[in-house]
Amino acid sequence: MSDDCRENHSYRKIKRARDSTNGVDSISSLPDVILQHIFSLIPTKYAIRTSVLSKRWKHVWSETPSLDIDCYRYKPDSVYETIARRYSSPKITTFRLSISTTEAKPKQIDSLIEFAVSHSTEKLSLELRHAYAVAYRFPEVFFTSCSLKQLFVESGTIDTIPGHVTVSWRSLKTLSLRGCVLSDEACAKILSGSPLLECLTLFCDKLERLDLSECLMLKRLDVQCWEQELQIVAPRISFLSLTHSDESKCELADVSSLTEANVNIYCSRRLGFLYDDFGDPETGLADSLQVLILQTLEKLQSVEKLTLCGAFCLQILSLAVVCGVPFPMFKKMEALTLEMAIYPSIVPGVAKLLQNSPRLKTIKFETVDCKMLEETRLTNYLYWKGLETRQCWKPKDLDGSEPELMSSVMKFLLKKSGDDWYK
């Protein structure tokens, strides 16, 4: 069911409630605070429409603590005029705005954000559609909202913050910037102005160095890199979720307090075009990928919980194991989750992970559909290295028949995790 269908269905349910048994209007008899809570659960445009039902309903929506405004099919000026003229609550708990940067002028977007800030909004969600086509830069007042506790921005440009503007997000605990352009300088200003920040999510372009050493309260970090190189200095965080492709490099300079990590290093489209060059020693591609992934794991040796996503990462680890590359120890790890596709080329890497985790108590395997390298490319690399290729991915005690593959891999891993395998 589409969003519009669901919204219309919710609105019709409110209207039908007036036609209850014996013609009694049970909804209208509810206290305003309950009606306003109901309005908080539906798009604001439908809450506003209830004002035509009767005098009783005329002003009920105007003190709804949460506003959900989607300017799709609505002119931003008319939306702003309606809420500016009729909304009467001095404080907004949640304000969600979805608007297109190609259809709305910057001043129109500014006015709606300024409205939210002027009403001491605690949770602000901004979805700026088509921002990739028309960049939008936030008004100065956006950076001075002392009431904000949670801020979510999807698309937007924060590459510059005027020198005279001081970021003052003194109450902010959760910050999520997805699909944004964020410069190092702007990021530093934001962090210095958010002393209570506990959770940070960044899926941003342009950012090259993320220094969180002065973020005393920050515990959770979720970072996704695309094609840039990023250095992370985060000595106080306890949880890290890291996602990037083989095209990008994320250096974990300091994550010394980590206890839990989720890592997804995935296979990009570029690597698909370079299959023929993957095993060629002149390109050094396979070697550099082993270094990239092993360096990341070395920084995670103190974690108690680790999740590795995707078969690609495990395939590269398997190459390192077969080639005799030193493998990190996980002396504190008690729980390991592997989200992967089951193929013989992941077995050496998984087995080595188990073998090098002496305190491991829980192993969780989740089969997922994910990108991976053709095993023939991996085998060609080993051939170039002068290594045995006939049994490297399919040891003799691993049943390769499709119906038995999963159980066979599990039995093999549990057996080999305690052996000196590939040493």
Image (spheres, rainbow, N blue to C red):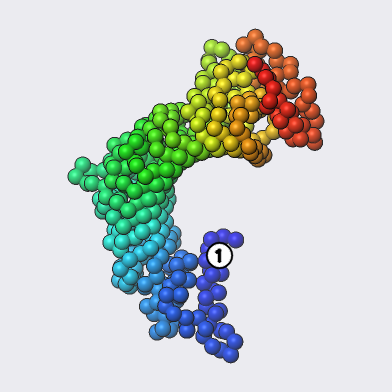
Which kind of residue does numbered mark 1 sit on? Arg
Q: Does residue 112 appear anywhere in the picture? A: no
Label 1, secondary structure: give it.
helix
Residue nearest the observer in this picture, 331 or 132: 331
User: In which image quadrant can residue 157 be found?
Assistant: top left
Q: Residue furthest left?
A: 164
Where is residue 423 shown, x and y percent of the image?
A: 65, 16
Q: Residue furthest front?
A: 359
Point 31% across, 57% down: residue: 147
Q: Does residue 396 appear anywhere in the picture? A: yes
173 w.r.t. 76: above or below: above
Where is residue 181 shown, x and y percent of the image?
A: 37, 40
Where is residue 171 shown, x and y percent of the image?
A: 32, 53
State the quadrant of the N terminus. bottom right
- 231 on left or right of 378: left
- 318 on left or right of 215: right
Residue, disc 1: 6
User: In which image quadrant can residue 267 be found?
Assistant: top right
Point 51% across, 21% down: residue: 291
Residue nearest the observer in this picture, 216 or 146: 216
Q: Residues within 10 Å of mark 1 (few under 14, many from 20)?
A: few
Q: Residue furthest bottom?
A: 22
Where is residue 365 shown, x and y percent of the image?
A: 66, 38
- 210 on left or right of 189: right
Residue nearest the observer in this picture, 5 or 418: 418
Point 42% across, 39% down: residue: 237
